[in-house]
Amino acid sequence: MQTKSLRGRDFLTLRDFTEEEINTFLDVGFDLKRRFAMGEKHSHLLEDKSLYMVFYNQSLRTRNSFESGMTQLGGHAHFLASDKIYTPAVEGEEKAYSTERVSDVARVLERYGDAIAIRMYGPPTGWVYGKANSYMEEFARWTDIPILNMECDKYHPCQALTDIMTVKEKLGQLKNKKFVMSWAYSPSYEKPLSVPQSAIIAATKMGMDVVQAQPKGFELDEEITDACAGYAEKSGGSFEVSYDMEEAFEDADVVYPKCWGSKAEFENVAQGDDSGMKKLFEENKDWKCDQEMLDIAKDDALYMHCLPADRGWEVSNEVMDGPQSVIFDEAENRMHSQKAVMSLVM
């Protein structure tokens, strides 16, 4: 394992890591999960270390998996709601006695602890695509301790690492397995592109045969899809884009139907006009994963979702609670994969 090369690294996107390094995260995650199941203590790994978690958005799985994980590793996770502290802001977005410049927050927390984790997307940045990611990079610029991305508007590396950990756990391997990341309808468009973009990054880097499916208007960031084509070529996998949900699901080993907003329309939403976004959503209500749709995939195909899922819209209860669903194993693995990241970079 190349643990030395990972120590001190930021965890902002899986684009920054090689296939070998991602496998190291997975190996450590599986080992820590085994120890947890056996009741073996591993609290010496991050004993007396502190993680500062800055949340601009609400959370269930992310906050609790990080807090529980840090406790099991012997450290402490500090929850910092952005509206309960002087909200970290970049130059030009500051408000007197309400915000504090990111550069100052980062350098103060660096003196107290060992890593800073941040979740930020959507409303806190006015849905300006890429703005939240720039905040992550600004934190990283001003501190020498690791910055962990708990989700921004471009990337969710913690979820992506968990996703491939779960697939490997269930299928035994990643190579030559068909992974379908598909859009699905929800009444709410307030969903960033971070989960689907990170999922296809992880899957192509690890040699899977990846299909990204969505209706017209819901294309992902072209910079990222171009990169994924390159990752697939290098890893021996494949990558393609489909505009037909049924066609994409054929012979799939893994299906991941999830809603996200239109990147192009977020620009209009940021200006106060969401009419185009709503129109796109209403035109594609048939993009739903029910049992009939799941049956198009392989008989033992895995149904995955990062949660929370919009039951009855994105997916039927029959699928979510059915035998092919691995969503709660996936949620559990958030804790173990994140423990691996923290153990290796902190």
Image (tube, rainbow, N blue to C red):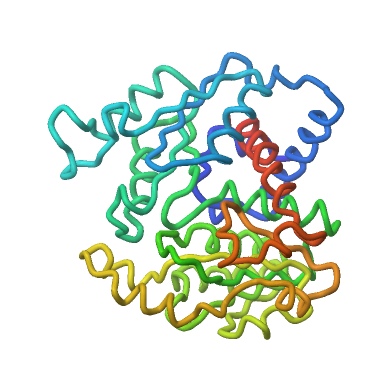
In the drawing, does residue 300 fall left or right of residue 107?
right
Q: Position of residue 217 (x, y in %)?
A: 42, 80
Residue 279, image x, y percentages:
36, 79
Q: Nearer the viewer, residue 145 or 54?
A: 54
Residue extending farthest to the top is: 48
Instruction: From the viewer's side, name the closer residue of 290 and 181.
Output: 290
Residue visible at 60% across and 72% down? 182
Quadrant showing the C terminus: top right
Residue furthest out toward the left: 96
Question: Which residue: 67% across, 41% down?
Answer: 337
Question: Percent position (x, y) of residue 341?
Answer: 62, 38
Pick the residue in front: 108 or 86: 86
19 w.r.t. 266: above or below: above
Q: Is residue 32 left or right of residue 181?
A: right
Residue 89 in the image: above or below residue 75: below
Residue 194: percent from left, percent from top: 49, 58
Q: How many marks?
A: 0
Residue at 62 percent of width and 81 percent of height: 245
In the displayed structure, would residue 260 be above or below residue 246? above
- Image quadrant occupied by the N terminus: top right
The residue lying at 74 percent from left, 47 percent from top is 329
Give the quadrant of residue 302. Answer: bottom right
